Amino acid sequence: MYLEKLRCPVSGSKLELVSFKEYTSSNGNTYTESGCLYSLVSNIYYPIINGVPIMLTFETPLTKKFEIDNKIVLQELPQSLKLPNLEPMHGEKSIQETFTEEWGGLGDDEIVFAYNEEEGYLLHKDVWLQMDEKEADKTNTVLDVGCGFGKEAKYLARIFKNSTVYAIDLNLAVIASGLNLLDTGRIIPVVASLYRIPYEDNSFDHVHCQGVIHHTFSTKAGFDAIEKKVKEGGTLFIWVYAWEDSFGIAGLRGFLVHTYYFVSHRIFRPILSRVPGFIRNPIVHLITMLYHPLVKNRGTNKGRWHYQHTLHAVRDMFTPMFAHRHRFNEVYLWFQEKNYSHIVFQSAKKYQDLFNRRIIGIGFRGTKTNVS
């Protein structure tokens, strides 16, 4: 059963499934479109909406609405069961809101950030993972932490051809793509916090987390939370913002880049992430209208870059509550402290060959050894 790996993120116990409505995919597989998972250990139930389990440990308007809409069928479950009502991690409510806006506005578009589908696939395969085909073919279970709307999970399913990709994200926009992802037969989407991942520790051949943990209250705490899910001999990939992205460039260009980072990270971001959506959204659209003419004809997607792509980029730049930056040796040490070997850094040369521009950020892949 495709949900059998899931565990209660509160108690760690196995879950029981109740289906209210089922969905048969184009390849003949049957999934729960609407229903819930529950644990009698924690006395908590988790809604399934559009095929996507909502494995959050805190309440949201969406889960409360599910409870109201399904009041009659929920009465058939043990009466001790309740929606989870724990406190979210610091900043998670804001993170969920702003990233739901960001990914909901883009949807399943071909272009994500600066890359079309083929470019995104090559970026992951040749620049970041740099894994030979034999090693990739031995990978059966992949955890994609921060899958967005699901495009990245599709890249990973393509790279790891024999794998099932378990794709999680805190943002609620992924629910809209739930049945589409399940239709692939190899991607299982889940809404969850990376600090309470609803899977057992040491259980994945590969864990992938690109551009996510630096948007939490602590990048290092995020790293510690996700690396636990890698089994011995498995691999972990992370990519985070780099200190060098703004401080490591000389001259006038370096000054301008650093000024941009200061304005976006220190001024606009803290303000926009905290104001209500009805204030934030008009401001974001105003910035997008001013910025779009400057970028729409740049890069390899000239002629295909539209307003919604600029809007997505602007939201990513200016609305997340956190956007930490780190140094090369700092991130490298995280891998070493957790007993990772064969640590591979992202290929700046391959990136230059593919996209004709300098690479940014810090991307490492390592192999886990000595699981205690």
Image (tube, grey):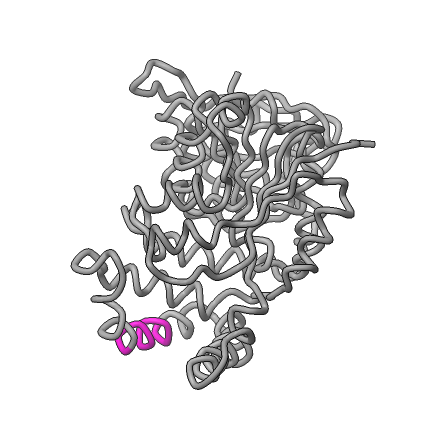
Asked if one can make out residue 79 in the rendered structure from this viewpoint, the answer is: no
- Where residue 284 appears, as percent x and y from the top left, is 37, 72
**Residue 299 lies in quadrant:** bottom left
Q: Is residue 297 left or right of residue 71?
A: left
- Where residue 255 appears, as percent x and y from the top left, is 47, 84
Q: Nearer the viewer, residue 372 or 178?
A: 372
The residue positioned 45% from the left and 38% from the top of the image is 69
Asked if one can make out residue 99 in the rendered structure from this viewpoint, the answer is: yes
Q: Is residue 226 above or below residue 39?
A: below
Q: Is residue 277 left or right of residue 210?
A: left
Which is the main secondary structure of the residues drawn in magenta? helix
Q: Is residue 209 above or below residue 142?
A: below
Magenta stretch bounds: 282-290
The residue positioned 36% from the left and 26% from the top of the image is 184
Q: Quadrant of the C terminus?
A: top right
- Where residue 154 appears, as percent x and y from the top left, is 39, 35
